[in-house]
Amino acid sequence: MTNEEAKEVLRRYRNPQSGGQDPELSAALELAKSDEELAAFLIRQKVFRERVQSGLRAHNPPANLREQILEAGKQARNQIEERKTVTVFPWRILAPLAAAALFAVVLSVASFWFGKSPEKNQFTDFRARTARIALRDYNRMDLKSTNSVAIRSFLADHSPFGNYSLPKGLNNSTTFGCATLRWRDIPMGMVCFKRGENDLIWLFMIESPFVLGAPSVGKPEFQSIGRFATASWSIGGKTYVLGLIGKEEDVKQYF
């Protein structure tokens, strides 16, 4: 079974973990144990399904649905009285209206959640977002501190990023502050380090399953976005973007 074939199999199940004895599903789940990309795909599908289900449960029907149904019932009764014919059960008239109302609710919820599909959360878009934050001289920190222990403790209490990893060149750098942010309603973390008197080094992080095309575990990828030079890598289920205002050679020195 190829990676793509396994994805097709996993898409067919609302809850792949309860697929019973289906041999194709068992093979796909077994492959996901050793294939990092497929494992991340399985996690994204699970998160996406849970969001859709949560949205459907939380979404209220149209406020005037009850009045519409009652009015349709009243009209049906009037028609029956006028015709004096064989009684027609009103649900035959109400059913199309109720079905249309239900379809409208489901369609609005589905369109909302499918607009947030993880398939659209490309890593390149996330990296571009980090550059925009840094280049606009962003200085809103949830916590300003030169104490790295305090930084990690704050992020552990307010996000999944308290155990973030650093490249070896940043181990002895002085922290400036940290913040918890959101990108497309997905949690992301940010830690800033001092670089000279007035400059900062930015470290952004996000959980890897939420982005497509994230860098593989291993050597970092270097990319400049305007004046913002970045290094990107993945490790421990998280994807990182380290950046500074300067050249690629400036950011490479931290690896």
Image (cartoon, rainbow, N blue to C red):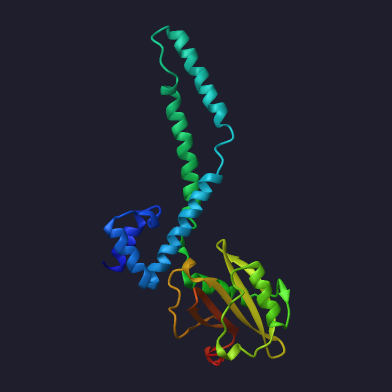
Quadrant in which residue 63 is drawn: top right
Q: Nearer the viewer, residue 104 or 158?
A: 158
Inspect this view and state whether residue 227 appears. Answer: no
Residue drawn where x is 71% and y is 86% of the image = 198
Quadrant in which residue 21 is drawn: bottom left
Residue drawn where x is 70% and y is 75% of the image = 139
In x, y percent, where is residue 210? 49, 66
Determine whether, in the image, residue 135 is placed left or right of residue 108.
Answer: right
In x, y percent, where is residue 27? 29, 63
Residue drawn where x is 56% and y is 36% of the image = 62
Residue drawn where x is 50% and y is 18% of the image = 75
Quadrant in which residue 188 is drawn: bottom right
Determine whether, in the image, residue 117 is placed left or right of residue 228.
Answer: left
In x, y percent, where is residue 50? 49, 54
Rendered view: 100 above or below 3 = above
Q: Nearer the viewer, residue 66 or 34?
A: 34
Inspect this view and state whether residue 120 appears. Answer: yes
Rendered view: 61 above or below 85 = below
Specify the quadrant that holds the N terminus. bottom left
Instruction: Kindly give the residue lying farthest to the front in the view shown.
Output: 21
Q: Nearer the viewer, residue 164 or 143?
A: 164
Determine whether, in the image, residue 110 is placed left or right of residue 172.
Answer: left
In x, y percent, where is residue 119? 43, 62
